[in-house]
Image (tube, helix red, strand yellow):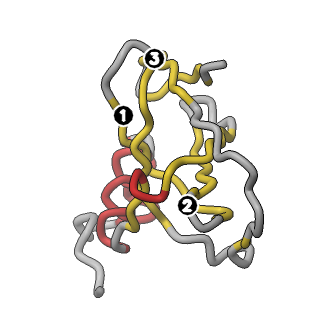
Amino acid sequence: MPLAFTLNSVTYGCLTPDPGEPGTTHTWEYGKQPKVVATLALVGGGTLDVYARAERWTQSHILVRWEDDDYRPRHAWLPSDSVRRVTASEWDIWEYHRCPANLRHVRWGDRLPGFLPA
């Protein structure tokens, strides 16, 4: 059954692949989950990239968690080749665009987003 969610005011239906028998599942320590971009397969074709955190992994799949427009958590097991780590600068830019414009000065002040050390 597809997972439906709204992101940037657009409603999507994504396919959630069956990871099969997970076997040994590993969990990243809370607060140290990698920041990633996950490519979701959409119902009807096409893909959508979402910024997410990787929570668990097996030999072939990664469980990612992202938030929709209402900040509800969404989860999907994805093949590991559909997930890539992002840099701190990439994540900072995404957070900047997700933050309401009238609140950006609180976190970023006069700093442009994305210029963080590697």
Above or below, 116 relative to 86: below
Q: Which residue sits furthest top?
A: 44
Q: Which quadrant is home to the N terminus?
A: top right
Residue 16 figure quarter: top right
Between discs 3 and 1, the one toward the N terminus: 3
Mark 3 closeness class: few <14, some 14–19, many ≥20 residues within 10 Å: some
- Res 102 seen here: no
- Element under disc 2: loop
- Residue under pointer 2: 60
Query: Which residue sits at x=23%, y=75%?
Result: 115
**Location of residue 80 in the rendering, given as x and y in whole percent from the top left corner:** 48, 58
- Element under disc 1: strand
Q: Nearer the viewer, residue 104 or 10?
A: 10
Q: Nearer the viewer, residue 88 or 96?
A: 88
Q: Is residue 16 left or right of residue 85?
A: right
Query: Which residue sits at x=51%, y=25%?
Result: 14
> Of tags 3 and 1, which is closer to the observer?
3
- Residue under pointer 1: 48
Above or below, 73 relative to 63: above
Q: Which residue sits furthest bottom?
A: 117
Q: Which quadrant is home to the C terminus?
A: bottom left
Q: Is residue 74 left or right of residue 97?
A: right
Three-letter code, disc 2: Ser
Q: Nearer the viewer, residue 77 or 87?
A: 77
Mark 2 closeness class: few <14, some 14–19, many ≥20 residues within 10 Å: few
**Alpha carbons under labels 3 and 1: distance apart:** 11 Å
Query: Which residue sits at x=55%, y=60%?
Result: 60
Three-letter code, disc 3: Val
Of the numbered discs in the image, which one, if any, rests on residue 43? 3
